[in-house]
C-alpha cells in the first residue's frame, strides 16, 4: 500500500512537471501566481515545480513584469535552447534532415536526393551520414540532443519503430529505430509522414488550438494524419489515414496497392503531369506544348492556369473535385474542426481548393461542415522534417517521457 502511494505521488510529480512545462510552451512567459491560477495547484506546489524545472535547465527566469500596484511578479519562460531535436524524412525523392529547438526554430538543415539504390542498409547509411553532418555543421553538442524523429511514408509501427511497408521503397518490416539507434547512439522515434505533418500543425502551425483536425498531404502519394481529441489515430494495424486508397473511379488507373481508381492515382503529382502530357500528345490546345521537350512541372501547369490556359485549369479543378470526395469522406467519418491541406500539388492552390470546398459542401453532412475550416498549411516545404522532430516535442510536452530518465540537474543526460 505504501509503495502504491509512493508510485502515485511520483506519477503526480511527473504529471505536474510536464503540465507547467507545457503551459509555458503554449502561453509564453508567466509568473508563479499565473501558473497557480491556470493549473489550480497551490503556490507552494508551483514554486517547487518551478525550482525543479530550473534545475533541469528547462525553464529560465525572464525577469520582473511591471504592474500598477504591489511587488512586480517574477516571470518564467521555457528555455527553448535547453535541448535540441533532430528530424529526418525519407521520401520518394529525397532524404531531409533538420535540427530544431523546442520552439521549432531551425538550427541547421540539409537534404540529399534519395539514392537509386533502395536497399535498406544503403539508404540508412546515407541517413546516418546526413544526421552526423547536420550535427557537426550546427555546432550543437550531441549531449544536448534529446533524440531523432523519423517520418516515413507508408505503413509504420510507431510503437516499435518499424517501417512495415513503404511502397515507394519496396521495404518490408525494417526496424528503423533499432538500426539508427545503433548507428547514431541517440534514441529514435518513427511515424508515418502524414502523422508527423499533423504534429507539426499541432505544435507550430494552424492547429495549435485544435484537438480534432486532419492534415491531408498530396504529393507523390495521398495520405492523411488524423488527430482525435488530442491524440493521433493510427488504426489497429497502423494503417489509419490511408485516404489515398479510397476508390473514386472504378475504371481508373491501377494503383501501387493493386486496386484500380484509387484517389492518389488521379491527383498525385505524377498523375497530373502524366495526364497533361497525354492530352498534349493527343493534340489538346495549350501554352504548355512549347515546354514538352524540356519536361513540364507542376509549377508550369499553375502558371499556365493563371494565364487562363483551359487545359491547365481543367486539370487542376478536376484534381480539386476528386480531392473533395476524399475530404468529404474524412469529414463524414471524423467530424473534425479543421482540415489542413499540404503537399506539392497545392502549388496551384486557388484552382484546387475552390472546387475541393464546393465538393465537400455538396457531399458532406451539413452538420459536419457547419463550423469546418479547410485551409492550406503555411509551414512551408520543411514542414515534414520539422514534423518528424516534433515526435519528440509531442512526447515531451504531453508527459510521455520520464523526466528523470532523460534529464539530469545539469540538463539533458
Image (cartoon, helix red, strand yellow):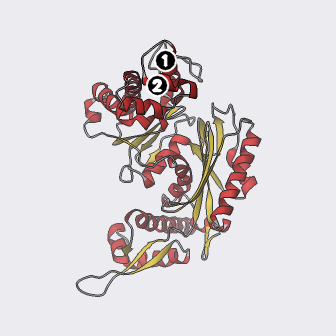
In the image, residue 15 above or below residue 381: below
Q: Quadrant of residue 65?
A: bottom left
Label 1: few (<14), some (14–19) or many (≥20) C-alpha neighbours in 10 Å: some
Mark 1, secondary structure of its residue? helix
> Label 1, label 2: how many angstroms apart (C-alpha)?
8 Å
Q: Percent position (x, y) of residue 259?
A: 55, 18
Locate residue 94: give its quadrant.
top right
Of residues 395 and 171, the one drawn nearer to the viewer in this rendering: 171
**Along the viewing direction, whichever of 9 and 94 lies nearer the viewer:** 94
Residue 173 as seen in the image, left or right of residue 258: right
Residue under the point 59% across and 35% down: 154
Q: Which residue is mark 2?
A: 288
Query: Would you place residue 306 above or below residue 287 in this image?
Result: below
Q: Residue furthest left?
A: 68
Q: Which mark is residue 280?
A: 1
Looking at this view, name the residue that lies furthest to the bottom.
71
Who's the residue at 26% across and 82% down the image?
67
Tell me if residue 271 can be seen: yes
Image quarter hosting the N terminus:
bottom right
The part of the image, by quadrant, that contains residue 134 is bottom right
Residue at the spot 71% in from the left edge and 35% down from the top edge? 116
Position of residue 398 measured from the top left corner of the image (x, y, whole percent): 48, 57
Percent x, y of residue 312: 41, 25
Residue drawn at (49%, 24%) of the image: 290
Which of marks 2 and 1 precedes in the sequence?
A: 1
202 sits to left or right of 186: left
Q: Position of residue 81 (x, y in %)?
A: 53, 69
Amino acid at each position: 500500500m505504501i509503495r502504491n502511494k509512493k508510485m502515485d505521488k511520483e506519477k503526480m510529480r511527473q504529471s505536474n512537471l510536464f503540465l507547467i512545462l507545457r503551459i509555458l510552451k503554449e502561453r509564453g512567459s508567466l509568473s508563479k501566481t499565473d501558473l497557480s491560477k491556470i493549473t489550480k495547484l497551490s503556490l507552494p506546489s508551483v514554486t517547487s515545480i518551478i525550482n525543479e524545472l530550473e534545475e533541469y535547465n528547462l525553464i529560465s527566469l525572464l525577469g520582473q513584469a511591471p504592474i500598477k500596484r504591489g511587488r512586480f511578479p517574477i516571470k518564467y519562460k521555457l528555455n527553448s535552447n535547453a535541448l535540441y531535436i533532430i528530424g529526418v524524412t525519407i521520401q520518394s525523392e529525397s532524404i531531409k534532415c533538420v535540427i530544431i529547438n523546442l520552439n521549432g526554430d531551425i538550427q541547421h538543415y540539409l537534404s540529399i536526393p534519395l539514392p537509386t539504390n533502395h536497399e535498406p542498409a544503403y539508404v540508412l547509411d546515407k541517413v546516418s551520414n546526413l544526421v552526423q553532418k547536420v550535427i557537426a555543421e550546427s555546432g550543437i553538442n550531441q549531449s544536448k540532443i534529446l533524440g531523432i524523429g523519423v517520418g516515413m511514408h507508408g505503413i509504420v509501427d510507431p510503437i516499435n519503430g518499424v517501417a512495415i511497408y513503404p511502397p515507394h521503397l519496396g521495404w518490408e518490416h525494417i526496424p528503423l529505430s533499432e538500426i539508427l539507434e545503433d548507428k547514431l547512439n541517440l534514441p529514435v522515434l518513427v511515424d508515418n509522414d502524414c502523422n508527423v505533418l499533423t504534429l507539426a500543425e499541432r505544435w507550430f502551425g494552424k492547429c495549435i488550438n485544435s484537438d480534432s483536425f486532419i492534415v491531408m498531404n498530396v504529393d507523390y502519394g495521398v495520405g492523411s494524419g488524423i488527430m482525435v481529441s488530442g491524440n493521433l489515430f493510427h488504426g489497429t494495424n497502423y494503417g489509419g489515414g490511408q485516404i489515398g486508397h479510397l476508390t473514386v473511379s472504378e475504371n481508373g488507373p491501377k494503383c501501387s496497392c493493386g486496386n484500380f481508381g484509387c484517389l492518389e492515382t488521379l491527383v498525385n503529382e505524377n498523375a497530373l503531369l502524366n495526364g497533361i502530357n497525354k492530352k498534349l500528345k493527343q493534340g489538346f490546345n495549350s501554352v504548355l506544348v512549347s515546354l514538352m521537350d524540356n519536361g513540364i512541372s507542376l509549377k508550369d501547369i499553375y502558371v499556365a492556369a493563371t494565364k487562363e490556359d483551359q487545359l491547365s485549369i481543367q486539370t487542376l479543378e478536376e484534381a480539386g473535385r476528386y480531392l473533395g470526395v476524399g475530404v468529404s469522406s474524412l469529414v463524414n467519418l471524423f467530424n473534425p474542426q479543421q482540415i489542413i491541406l499540404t503537399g506539392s500539388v497545392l502549388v496551384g492552390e486557388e484552382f484546387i481548393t475552390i472546387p475541393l470546398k464546393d465538393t465537400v459542401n455538396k457531399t458532406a453532412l451539413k452538420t459536419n461542415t457547419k463550423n469546418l475550416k479547410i485551409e492550406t498549411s503555411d509551414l512551408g516545404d520543411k514542414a515534414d522534417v520539422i514534423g518528424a522532430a516534433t515526435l519528440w516535442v509531442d512526447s515531451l510536452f504531453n508527459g510521455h517521457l520520464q523526466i528523470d530518465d532523460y534529464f539530469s540537474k545539469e540538463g539533458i543526460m
